[in-house]
Image (spheres, rainbow, N blue to C red):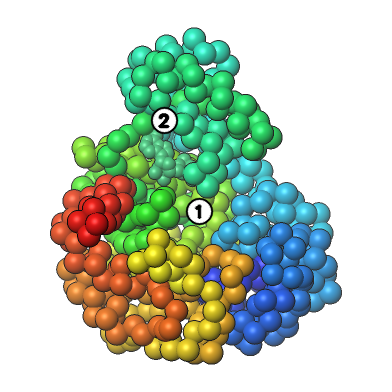
Amino acid sequence: MFSRILIANRGEIALRIIRAAKQLGLETVCVYSTVDADGPWLEYADRTFCIGPGPAADSYLRIDRIISAAEIANVDAIHPGYGFLAENAHFAEVCRDCHIEFIGPSPEAMGILGDKISCRKMAKSARTPIFPGSPGEIEEVDEAVKIASKIGYPVIVKASAGGGGRGMRICRDEAELLSNIGVAQKEAEASFGNGAVYLEKYLESARHIEVQVLGDKHGNAIHLYNRDCTSQRRHQKLIEEGPAPGVDPKIRDMVAKSAAALIRKVGYAGAATVEFLMDRDQKFYMLEVNTRIQVEHPVTEMITGVDIVRASIMIAAGEPLEHQQKDIAINGHAIECRINAEDPDRDFMPQAGLVEIFSPPGGFGVRVDSHVRPGYRIPPNYDSMIGKLIVHGANRAEAIARMQVALNEFRIGPIRTTIPLHQKLLKHQQFIDADFDINYVERWMQNESDKSS
Ligand code: ADP
């Protein structure tokens, strides 16, 4: 096992990793930027290093400075958390060259799954369901037209190296496809340094369902069932829950197994999430694989009892998985609300500044993962998520009721947060019935604003 790890991240996920590391008896080292100098999580680290000013490009993304800190502190491994360098294969490679274990997959596995075309090919051979589409890169426009007319419009042209919702174009007919392909290739080349694009069927109405998986360095891979992240705004997840409500257990298990098969095939070591869209007939299509710990991992921890951050550290240290597939069962239902420092009444304007009041809810089945405390000043430089409220119940109805009470107890001020939005969503009939698709939140918000104007 390691004796000391460095955490190349900040905020709630830095705190989450510190907790897991300490429970494993490890020392923790944190790097931070000048605007995070008073970050409450730093108090719990054994050692801290300032690595630069507020802008992430000058601190949390500076591989040279992070590696310097790691070498001075003599750590065995680096946990990247999510965001920043978590899916940067070059960083994983530099860690390897410096004989520091990267707590995550190998740069090779990251490369295969991070490229959408090679990920699709791997998925196909692992029998993970994918969208109908082009077998590989589109080279000729004629070829795209042929495939599109076979699978039917609408289709979506996607950059193989795309990410963060960029590099995608929906085409509703042949004319749109013809005018989009060349532009998409040029754009992909300019934005990602890789002009490869491919084509797949575009699903108008779908739910976002993802499978949490774990693989180790001994060729074992298991799944921890699924989460539903259909409640989104501008492709940003707001609420996540697990297990995904209403999915036929047979289909659920088949898809989850296929996700584990995919990472086994890649020789993946670490935690990953295989994301899918599900249509009204409960057909699943893989979107992409996230090769890191995700924000919503606590949902799965609550229903399976598996500490995913602990698992990621142990896997990197070369330990075999602590659980076999037969040990994993779903217990009850969990829901997570992302608490963002944003004003839902003013177009989600980010709310930097002093948090005077921070009084989290508690009680049976309530978990709050947050680095915030009264007197904390939210810097304007980073993601606006200041915490996650997670509840667990015997079933979905109990979890919803528990979440409603917990949201009503939560006091944060004077900054505005997304709590009022969650309070409304938890009462939304489409959410309660799980009769929703990834556009329902935006449709509902549009209706509300039409009504008030
Ligand atoms: P990125 O890596 O940029 O996040 P994804 O492939 O995950 O790209 O797609 C981002 C979002 O775009 C998805 O969450 C989904 O809402 C939408 N999307 C992508 N592909 C499709 C598709 N084939 N049909 C419908 N929506 C899609």
Q: On the image, numbered disc 1 is attached to which residue?
A: 272
Q: Quadrant of residue 377?
A: bottom right
At horizontal 49% and vertical 19% (from top left) the residue drawn is 179
What mark, if any, has residue 170 been given in the picture? 2
Residue type highlighted by circle 2: Ile
Does label 1 or label 2 sit earlier along the sequence? 2
Of residues 319 and 254, which is closer to you in this image?
254
The quadrant of the image that shows the C terminus is bottom left
Q: Which secondary structure lies at badge 2?
A: strand
Q: CA distance from mark 1 to mark 2?
A: 27 Å
Question: Vertically, is 354 above or below 148?
Answer: below
The percent position of residue 210, horizontal first and vertical second, equals 38, 51
- Between circles 1 and 2, the one closer to the viewer is 2
Residue 444 in the figure: left or right of residue 135: left
Question: Which quarter holds ligand 1?
Answer: top left
Residue 400 in the figure: left or right of residue 305: left
One can see residue 177 in this view: yes
Residue 359 in the figure: left or right of residue 443: right
Q: Which secondary structure lies at badge 1?
A: strand
Question: Vertically, is 245 above or below 59?
Answer: above
The percent position of residue 63, horizontal first and vertical second, equals 76, 59
Question: Vertically, is 253 above or below 72?
Answer: above
Q: Quadrant of residue 55?
A: bottom right
Q: Single out the residue that lies furthest toward the front.
A: 453
Question: Vertically, is 122 above or below 381?
Answer: above
The quadrant of the image that shows the N terminus is bottom right
The percent position of residue 50, horizontal first and vertical second, equals 76, 76
At horizontal 71% and vertical 59% (from top left) the residue drawn is 57
